[in-house]
Image (tube, grey):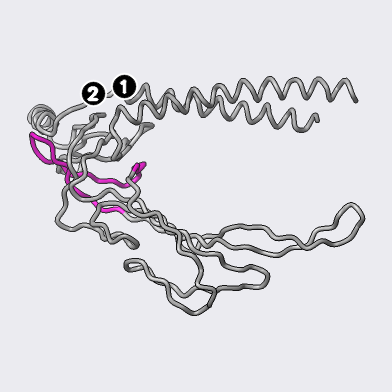
């Protein structure tokens, strides 16, 4: 009982940290000005004339459309995009043995999953709004993409039959030891060409060309198909939920610790 109580207190501390972290992220987004590409270009030009090219280092938010003439092709859904994340998981059923109260072995079954493939890629691209275009260097970004594929493919019951989705293919095994394959779950997210997105990062011309990239110091670099308003609503909900959960966990934890000491 004491151990469970202390675990709940630790969990409460973790949830409080998550809640404050979400609030910090939301405050940072709210305090950052949304700019047009034209305004950033003018700012870079003004800085260049004043102190020289490469001096711009400006936290900003920009909204616009994804453009590139060299898109990626996502592996599973073959979506033209600038970012994708794919995962293939095998779902299985396995037999195992467990001793009962009488010390006898009983045969049981349970389900589980393991990862067959997990991959993500991104490329540089252009963001275009009504006033112009700006290059985006997405290294280090947190991508919030849209789901382009979610499909479960049941097992055929035979090994050796190739499964193919887009450019991804593999030969599954129906049975491995006590594990019997039930099927495969295919998931893919992407940021497609032409998609309207929201970017929170910094504008800089340190490499000789104006672009959006990751902040050099502490800060957020978000590339999202969800709007700033949607992200703010989700962040508020997460922060509130974590704080409520922390209070409940802390109360229960304290009660269990007190009961443990009394019974001890």
**Who's the residue at 89% across and 52% down the image?**
101
- Residue shown at the point (21%, 35%) measured from the top left: 203
Q: Give the range drawn in magenta.
A: 122-144
Is 179 magenta? The answer is: no
Disc 2 is placed on an element classified as: loop
Kindly report the distance in space between the C-alpha atoms of the residues bearing marks 2 and 1.
Answer: 8 Å
Residue 79 visible in rendering: yes
- Nearer to the camera, 152 or 211: 152
Query: Residue 241, which numbered label?
Result: none
Q: In which quarter of the image is residue 231?
A: top left
Answer left or right for 180 relative to 202.
Answer: right
Q: Between residues 258 and 79, which one lies in front from this camera angle?
A: 79
Left or right: residue 255 versus residue 147 is right
Name the residue beneath numbered marker 1.
30
* Dot 2 crowding, Cα within 10 Å, few <14, some 14–19, many 20+: few
Q: Provide residue 114's location: percent of width, then percent of height.
A: 55, 60
Image quadrant where residue 157 sits = bottom right
Is 124 included in the stretch rendered in magenta? yes
Is residue 226 found left or right of 126 in the rendered image?
right
- Mark 1 neighbour density, 10 Å: few (under 14) some (14–19) many (20 or more): few
Comparing 169 with 181, the one in front is 181
The structure residue drawn at horizontal position 37% and vertical position 55%, both measured from the top left corner, is 120
Q: Residue 33 carries which label?
A: 2
| Residue contact at pointers 2 and 1, CB within 8 angstroms | no
Mark 1 secondary-structure assignment: helix
Q: In which quarter of the image is the C terminus?
A: top right
109 lies left or right of 77:
right
144, above or below 18, in the image:
below
Residue 106, x across and y down, in percent = 82, 61
Q: Quadrant of residue 216?
A: top left
């Amino acid at each position: 009982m004491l151990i469970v109580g202390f675990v709940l207190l630790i969990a409460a501390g973790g949830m409080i940290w998550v809640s404050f972290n979400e609030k910090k992220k939301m405050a940072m987004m709210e305090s950052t000005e949304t700019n047009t590409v034209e305004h950033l270009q003018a700012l870079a030009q003004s800085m260049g004339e004043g102190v020289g090219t490469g001096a711009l280092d400006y936290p900003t938010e920009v909204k616009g459309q994804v453009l590139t003439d060299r898109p990626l092709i996502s592996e599973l859904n073959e979506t033209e995009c600038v970012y994708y994340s794919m995962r293939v998981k095998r779902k299985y059923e396995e037999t195992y043995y467990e001793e009962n109260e009488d010390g006898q072995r009983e045969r049981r079954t349970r389900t589980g999953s393991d990862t067959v493939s997990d991959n993500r890629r991104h490329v540089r691209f252009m963001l275009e709004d009504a006033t112009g275009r700006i290059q985006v260097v997405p290294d280090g970004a947190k991508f919030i993409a849209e789901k382009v594929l979610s499909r479960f493919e049941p097992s055929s019951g035979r090994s050796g039959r190739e499964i193919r989705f887009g450019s991804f293919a593999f030969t599954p095994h129906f049975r491995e030891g006590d594990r019997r394959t039930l099927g495969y779950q295919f998931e893919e997210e992407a940021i497609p060409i032409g998609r309207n997105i929201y970017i929170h990062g910094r504008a800089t011309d340190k490499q000789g060309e104006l672009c959006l990239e990751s902040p050099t110091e502490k800060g957020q670099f978000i590339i999202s198909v969800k709007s700033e308003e949607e992200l703010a609503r989700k962040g508020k909900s997460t922060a509130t939920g974590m704080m409520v959960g922390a209070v409940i966990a802390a109360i229960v934890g304290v009660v269990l610790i007190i009961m443990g000491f009394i019974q001890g």
